[in-house]
Image (tube, grey):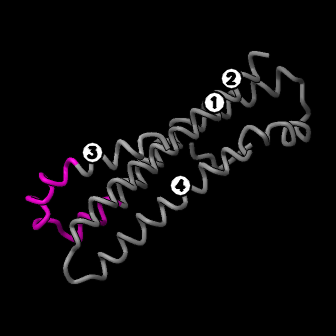
Amino acid sequence: MQACVWPITGLTAVLLLAACACTEASAQAAQCTKGDFEAVVDEAAASLRDLTRQHTPQFQAKLRQLKDKRAWSNDQFMKEAEPFVRDDKIAGFDQKSEEFLARITSGGQSQSASAKPDCALLLELRAAMQALVDTQRTKWSYMFDKLDKELAR
């Protein structure tokens, strides 16, 4: 079974850190470049790939354990495993992730087309990137916890 699974914690902390860093960043703000915006997008993509690469094999192995433990047929497995990758809470994580990703992508693209980089936007994009990664980590934790509880039954 292959599912696209992407696990907000820390959004408030990220925004507070960004605000605290604002004084330091304003000294550096005049020095940001279009490449800095592209780097934010690249970092987000790399972080998400790393999370997926790290967690997918473990998650799929646990799903196979559950399949074996319950002696599910392949068809039954596809039906029974769905709640571990799709439920309302996971959909909420996915929606938040899509919003953060759209913010990161549109901010990066607008700066690529702009003549002069908006360095304040760069801070917002970094905060959105961190919030996106945190959302995915939380989603993975939720899904693993849910699956671990089922395996323990």
Residue drawn 32% across the image and 55% down it? 126
Label 1 environment density (alpha carbons within 10 Å; few <14, some 14–19, many ≥20) = many
The x and y percentages for residue 139 are 58, 40
Which residue is labeled 4 in the image?
Answer: 97
Q: Are marks 1 and 2 in contact (CB under 8 Å)?
A: yes
Picture residue at 31% right of the left edge, 82% below the top: 113
Three-letter residue code for mark 2: Asp
Mark 1 or mark 3: whose residue is earlier in sequence: 3
**SS category of the residue bearing label 2:** helix
Give the CA separation, mark 3 to mark 2: 33 Å
Lower sequence index among marks 3 and 2: 3
Mark 3–mark 2 CB contact (< 8 Å) = no
Q: Is residue 63 above or below residue 134?
A: above
The quadrant of the image that shows the C terminus is top right
Residue range highlighted in magenta: 20-40
List the residue tagged with mark 3.
17
Which one is earlier in the sequence, the residue at label 3 or at label 4? 3
- The residue at which mark 2 appears reads as 148
